[in-house]
Amino acid sequence: MDLSDRPRRLRRDGIRGMVSETDVDASDLIAPVFVDATTDVRRPIESMPGHERVPVSEAVARVEEVLETGVEAVMLFGIPESKDERGTRAWADDGVVQEATRRVTAETDAYVITDVCLCEYTDHGHCGVLEDGAESAARLTVRNDETLDLLGKIAVSHAEAGADMVAPSGMMDGMVGAIRESLDAAGFSDVPIMSYAAKYESAFYGPFRDAADGAPAFGDRRHYQMDPANRREAMREVRLDVEQGADVLMVKPALPYLDIVRDIREEFDHPVAAYNVSGEYAMLHAASEKGWLNLEEVALESLVSMKRAGADLILTYFAEDVADQL
Ligand code: PBG
């Protein structure tokens, strides 16, 4: 054969690594950590092998485990001691995330990002204040503008506790602008916002909803999270968040939405984050338990794909395992 171009020449050991286009580094990864005010002991999360809900007293120890692997950032999620209609424990000065943030920032060098949302704090499990009489799915509406005030309060309470960055995930219109304004007014103009700019209404969140006890008690999140069928709409969402002052743009979930990661990477200059969600983690674990996939290999390949698609940061339950492997 007279082939002038033979790509296989560069695939041999020795050169293969040198021509590799994409790297995953521990410093790109963010590890989710669940802090639970309803327990005094660490409790394993069944659908997310290797992950636990830890009490506030164990938050520092848990974050130190993450840091030992080389991962430098954590995302804190809270499970409050009690829930109510408006999710008031979400912005309490002595709330679970606020207490954990105070300890972790005082005692470790971790970069602490906090989840700013109401679904773990409301008794109905929705990401905001419900319309009166919305107890049936048919009439279900989260009141957008009233919810914005609460999101601003949550973000400020996290910043007061020492959070390095806040990450609003509620998909309310105007959410980034409202949080930016509240943070600035409270003197936190240096605290960046990582916006879940394109967050889809995804069935891949299943295990997380067990982990964080945040499943809607009735109805679903279709009237605020995005339709998985939509690509152009993601750009519209991102554009709005950029206009409102988002610092990092997140796409969620990751693997089934790599086209969206790529679109954002091409159109905007902001850092892009991908959230490799609980269902993506659980399915690889389940298949590897059956002996059908090699967990280490598929985990790393997944994260490489996200980087290749254009993600700068990856929020993943595999953070510690992959960092250990690197
Ligand atoms: C909402 C929130 C969710 C996740 C992160 N933040 C759940 C939801 O929107 O229902 C899901 C993350 C995952 O599945 O790993 N605060």
Image (tube, grey):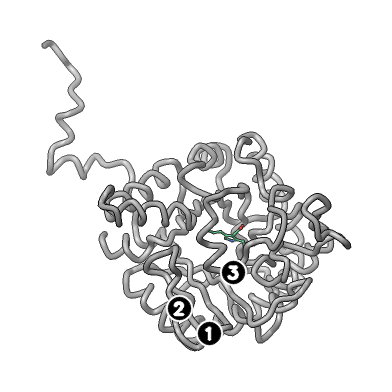
Mark 2 residue type:
Arg
Horizontal and vertical percent position of residue 37: 58, 83
- Foreground residue among 184 and 74: 74
Which residue in the protein does label 3 denote?
213
Above or below residue 172? Residue 15 is above
Which residue in the protein does label 2 denote?
43
Mark 1 residue type:
Thr
Mark 2 touches mark 1? (CB < 8 Å) = yes
Which residue in the protein does label 1 denote?
39
Q: Secondary structure at mark 3?
A: loop
Mark 2 touches mark 3? (CB < 8 Å) = no
**Ligand 1 quadrant?**
bottom right
* Residue farthest along the top direction in this orientation: 2
Badge 3 local density, few (<14 within 10 Å), some, or many (20+)?
Answer: some
Mark 3 residue type:
Asp
177 sits to left or right of 1: right
- Distance between the Cα atoms at labels 3 and 1? 13 Å
The disc, 3 or 1, on the residue closer to the chain's N-terminal end is 1
Q: Secondary structure at mark 1?
A: loop
Q: Looking at the figure, which quarter contains the C terminus?
A: bottom left
Instruction: Identify the residue at horizontal 64%, vertical 69% (top origin).
Output: 120
Instruction: Identify the residue at horizontal 68%, vertical 80% (top origin).
Output: 82
Horizontal and vertical percent position of residue 70: 33, 69
- Foreground residue among 50 and 299: 50
Badge 1 local density, few (<14 within 10 Å), some, or many (20+)?
Answer: some
